[in-house]
Image (spheres, rainbow, N blue to C red):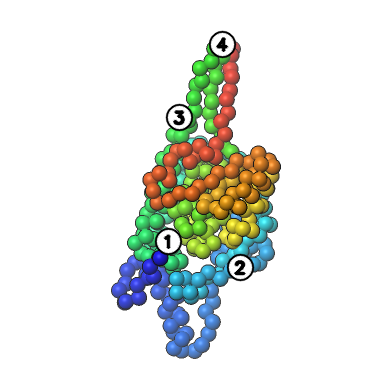
Amino acid sequence: MAKRPSTNGKSNGTLAAVKPLRAARLQDDHGDARIPVLKTYKIFVGGKFPRTESGRFYLLKDARNEPIANMCLCSRKDFRDAVVAARPAQAGWAKRAAYNRSQILYRIAEMLEGRRAQFIAELVQCGGDNSSATKEVEQSIDRTLYYAGWADKYQQIFSTVNPVQSSHFNFSMLETTGIVAAIAPEKSGLLGLISVIMPAICGGNSVIALASYSNPLAAVSFAEVLATSDLPGGVVNILTGLRSELCEHMASHMDVNAVIACNGEPAERKLLQQKGAENMKRVIFHDRDWSKDEAQSPYMILQTQETKTTWHPIGV
């Protein structure tokens, strides 16, 4: 069971970010009665922060069952809007030099480091303890750096010159899959989200990610990092809401090329496979501990790549 933040009067850098909300409530309790104005977090689509099309939201609560914020409850229309934004962005992103993609991922890691205390505080607000939250944020930064390093190297590892018996050159290289819809793990609010987004965009894909329903604060703040980095708008889009409402649309949308689903139930996996088969969509399942070193690998990049083989006659 997750530990609750300490309230014994000892201060630290993480809990300092949480105190203003609690102090306001205490003042309300002992002074004039009023209803605090909770922030409504928007979604991230096409490099902008629109409100959800349906106008729906859900109330996010902390470990003390106190309200934290209002979160958008995304609809099918929100997902379709994200696909419309992701398609043109993907083409331009894939054409960028691999070294430039590496630079941009490195910039994202720099910005995560600069807002480290904020992300720790948000994970604590959603029920984590200070130690685990600190570790998750640090691993998220390091994982972003890991894929920044691979962005201009994975082609060298996985591309091949193939031996043939005719008078031809035969070589294989990787190309992007296209638009990847990703359902982030429920228990890992930041690290799991970054672990599925980074290898996909490292390889030139665009991503539409559904954040954790119960732990979405860090995901929305991560969207703010992306919006102020050098990442082109539409390359990463982040939605909040129920996976039970959106997973079918992710798998059935004919302009989505791959789906990544983390920690899904058997019924959900079956649904994704059936709907994904309608347009030969690649469906990838992950059920792993994202805090382990085994959760990062260049093979994660390979999962959202297509292999293109070219034949060329010798002497021409």
Q: CA distance from mark 2 to mark 3?
A: 46 Å
Residue marked by disc 2:
57
Q: Earlier in the sequence, mark 4 or mark 1?
A: 1
Q: Quadrant of residue 125?
A: bottom left
* Residue 5 at x, y percent in the picture: 37, 70
Q: Earlier in the sequence, mark 4 or mark 3?
A: 3
Q: Are marks 4 and 3 in contact (CB under 8 Å)?
A: no
For the residues bearing labels 2 and 4, Cβ distance under 8 angstroms:
no
Q: Amino acid at mark 2?
A: Phe
Rounded to the nearest angstrom, the CA distance separating label 2 from label 1 is 22 Å
Q: State left or right for residue 36 relative to residue 248.
A: left
Identify the residue position indicated by label 3 in the image: 156
Q: Nearer the viewer, residue 137 or 185?
A: 185
Q: Amino acid at mark 4?
A: Ser
Looking at the rendered structure, the secondary structure element under dot 1 is helix
The residue that label 4 is drawn on is 167
Residue 179 visible? The answer is: no
Tags 4 and 1 in contact by the CB under 8 Å rule? no
Q: Residue at x 50, y 47 (%)?
A: 286
Q: Residue furthest front?
A: 266
